Image (tube, grey):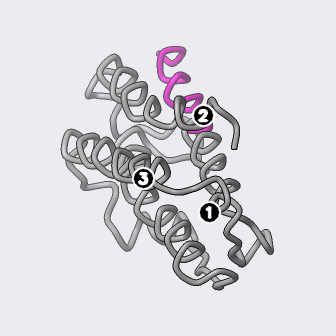
Amino acid sequence: MHPYLLISLPLGPGIVRKLVENIPESQYDVALAEDRFTVREVVAHLADGEVLFRARIESALNSPNAEVAGFDEGERAIEQNYAASNIEEQLALFEAERATTVSLLKSISIDQFRAPYIHPYFGQMVVEDQANMLVGHDMYHIEQLLAYSDSP
């Protein structure tokens, strides 16, 4: 496991919060591109996704080589009604869920970071892969939120 992983994972929710606080509320429900979430939807997606991604880690730890379920992000956004979510509640939920994920990862051994699971799209992965994907997922949406500072 890379030493920066457990240092960087807790940072995502705070960065997302600071970015959202600097976006005018009038922009929360504006999508900058047809195929992208709005600010409100991004925050709900991050909070909801944290639980789903941690479940994959737990599956690998509890049942090595378990097959985990995939999900369509767009369909999930509709099912969970991201568009009507309370942004402050979702920010707090993302922070709390990430803290739970980080606590779990800090509690496992290096060998457990190699616990495998089967992803429906990527095939065999290990806990460390999923943990690294969380950082990448944060960055993807942080970049998206930064684009609001460039919009009129």
- Residue for badge 2: 139
**Which numbered disc, 2 or 3, marks the residue that appears first in the sequence?**
3
The image quadrant where one finds the N terminus is: top right
- Residue for badge 3: 101
Check residue 112 in the rendering and tell me which mark sits there, or answer none: 1
Location of residue 84 in the rendering, given as x and y in whole percent from the top left corner: 25, 55
Q: Camera-side residue: 4 or 71?
A: 4
Badge 3: residue crowd in 10 Å (few <14, some 14–19, many ≥20)? many
**Which numbered disc, 3 or 1, marks the residue that appears first in the sequence?**
3
Q: Secondary structure at mark 1?
A: helix
Left or right for 45, reference 137: left
Location of residue 96 in the rendering, given as x and y in whole percent from the top left corner: 28, 47
Badge 1: residue crowd in 10 Å (few <14, some 14–19, many ≥20)? some
Q: Secondary structure at mark 2?
A: helix
Which secondary structure type mostly characterizes the magenta part of the structure?
Answer: helix
The residue sitting at 29% across, 21% down in the picture is 21
Location of residue 130 in the rendering, given as x and y in whole percent from the top left corner: 63, 57
Q: Which residues are magenta?
A: 139-152
Q: CA distance from mark 1 to mark 2?
A: 25 Å
Q: CA distance from mark 2 to mark 3?
A: 17 Å
Check residue 16 in the rendering and tell me which mark sits there, or answer none: none
Left or right for 34, reference 99: right
- The reply to whether the C-beta atoms of the residues labelled 2 and 3 are less than 8 Å apart is no
- The reply to whether the C-beta atoms of the residues labelled 3 and 1 are less than 8 Å apart is no
